Image (cartoon, rainbow, N blue to C red):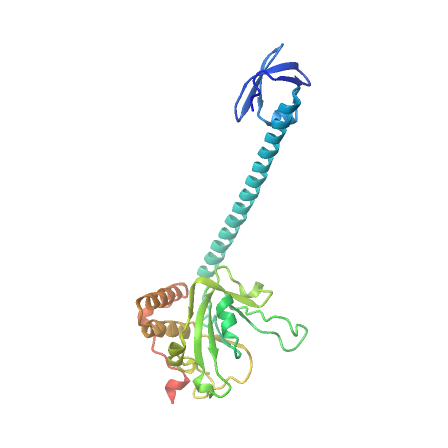
Amino acid sequence: MNLVDKEVIHRTFGRGNVANYNDSYVKVEFESGAKRFVFPDAFGKYIKLVDEKAADLVKRKIEEREEERRKEAIRLEKERALEQERLRILEEKKRIRSRRIHPSIQSVFWCEEGEEDDIFTKWSVFTGEIKSGDRKGQPRRLARMNQNSGCLLTKRDSNMKEEDRRILGVFMADEGFNGRRCEDGYIPAHPRYRIRLSDQESEKMLFWNYYINKRFPHRMTWNSGRQRYFKNMWMAQILRDIVSLRKDVEGEEEAKQFFEHFCKINRIDEEELPRPNGALKRL
């Protein structure tokens, strides 16, 4: 496209000819003198090309420029949204770090038969439904749970004794998760801190080695309910034992990083972490 010497009409300066132009500006010679305009925008507002073919080419150029600006605006809006989300997560982290950590902000879940594959595929767990009252049937909100919380997945087959309940895996809640504001009842997993145990590993990780009912320390019962809160210290003990359990270098490193991260955000001293002393250990 060559617009040099093309005749134009300006609504104020009258007729003129294009002297030169580039991707940013166009210079037009009028009887009153040379004027510079933004290119190609001016052709859609102030200047009209007499040559229809050239006018169509410029119109196409204007449409392309507008499309570029539209895409750029969308990109900037996405960047702003991401930045706002990043700042929100940072603020949430700062708020959590500054407050006292409740000693039991972890959750243990009873996985139903065949449910574990879906949990470990989607890497999220459902908190369960409220069984009675005005909110009956609505998802439970676990108010204690936040980004410092882990989800422990356990299972007991129907032909098993409760004392043989196995740990299937564990994951941290995703960054920015807040149990008070969770409306759909699903806790999403952190993209990095998540572990699914193999069948052989799971058989060696018995839930009641860690958990204890304070009122009945020798009793191993889970009569009803999908979830119960779990001590931070117990979760740290489990993660430490998974590190010891894993023999391959990659698996051991994965568990070690998880354990160290968990202890750091929950202010647990690894050196002072006691050995497990759950109900099974007291038999």
85 up-or-down from 38: above or below: below
| Quarter where residue 48 is shown | top right
| Quarter where residue 166 is shown | bottom left
Q: Nearer the viewer, residue 260 or 270?
A: 260
160 up-or-down from 268: above or below: below
Q: Residue at x 55, y 80 (%)?
A: 225
Query: How many marks are shown on the rendered structure?
Result: 0
Q: Residue at x 61, y 70 (%)?
A: 139
Residue 145 position within the rendered picture, expressed as x and y whole percent measured from the top left: 51, 67
86 up-or-down from 135: above or below: above
Q: Nearer the viewer, residue 158 or 221?
A: 158
Q: Residue furthest front?
A: 53
Q: Residue furthest bottom?
A: 283
Looking at the rendered image, the quarter that the N terminus falls into is top right
Residue 207 position within the rendered picture, expressed as x and y whole percent measured from the top left: 43, 80
Looking at the rendered image, the quarter that the C terminus falls into is bottom left
Q: Nearer the viewer, residue 117 or 266?
A: 117
| Quarter where residue 19 is shown | top right
Residue 13 position within the rendered picture, expressed as x and y whole percent measured from the top left: 66, 15
Q: Nearer the viewer, residue 240 or 274?
A: 240
Q: Residue at x 39, y 74 (%)?
A: 238
Residue 244 position within the rendered picture, expressed as x and y whole percent measured from the top left: 32, 73
190 up-or-down from 7: above or below: below
- Report whether 271 appears left or right of 108: left
